[in-house]
Image (cartoon, helix red, strand yellow):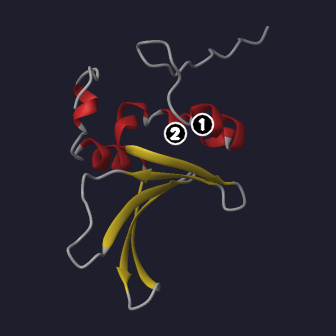
Amino acid sequence: MAKKKAKTEHKRPDGTEVRFLSYVKKQAPNLYEQYASLQPFEDVISQCWVNTKEGYVGIGIETGGGAWPSGSYDTYGARIYADKVLLFQDTYIPKEGSDTDCYREEHVTDMAGLWTYLRQLPRPISSFGKWTGGK
């Protein structure tokens, strides 16, 4: 008799599902466990997308940085493949008019490298308590 595979649940302590998890499970089931392992870093993941043609789950990463005085800004993210992780930083530099140049820096790592990178990022204050209001 075949053993039943244990169902893996990825829920927050309050019972709600991790953001984007059902989307990844539906669009890229082969990468579901890799994405689910990012649950402790949910507070710095700003977006998620799936590229089924190239076989990856992409995430946007909040680093706590802002725009430069020149109007340039950086965005950070990762592409999670079955066998590797590609970390990237895009730098956008405005030109005269409405044009913008984008320069990309990429680094190849694995899931452990991605976890290490995410672990060292500054956390938003909302990660440490419940919002009670404000002015």
Residue picked out by circle 2: 35
Residue 33 appears left or right of 124? right
Task: Name, please, the residue furthest toward the top.
Answer: 1
Residue 84 in view = no
In front here: 131 or 22?
131
In front here: 87 or 109?
87
Tell me if label 1 and label 2 are in contact, CB under 8 Å.
yes
Amino acid identity at mark 1: Tyr
Residue 83 appears left or right of 23? left
Whole-percent x and y of residue 74?
33, 67
Q: Determine the secondary structure under disc 2.
A: helix
Whole-percent x and y of residue 73?
32, 70
Q: CA distance from mark 1 to mark 2?
A: 5 Å
Residue 46 in view = yes
Residue picked out by circle 1: 32
Whole-percent x and y of residue 5?
67, 17
Q: Residue at x 76, y 12 (%)?
A: 2
Circle 2: is it few (<14), some (14-19), or many (20+) Cα within 10 Å?
Answer: many
Task: Name, please, the residue furthest toward the bottom.
Answer: 96
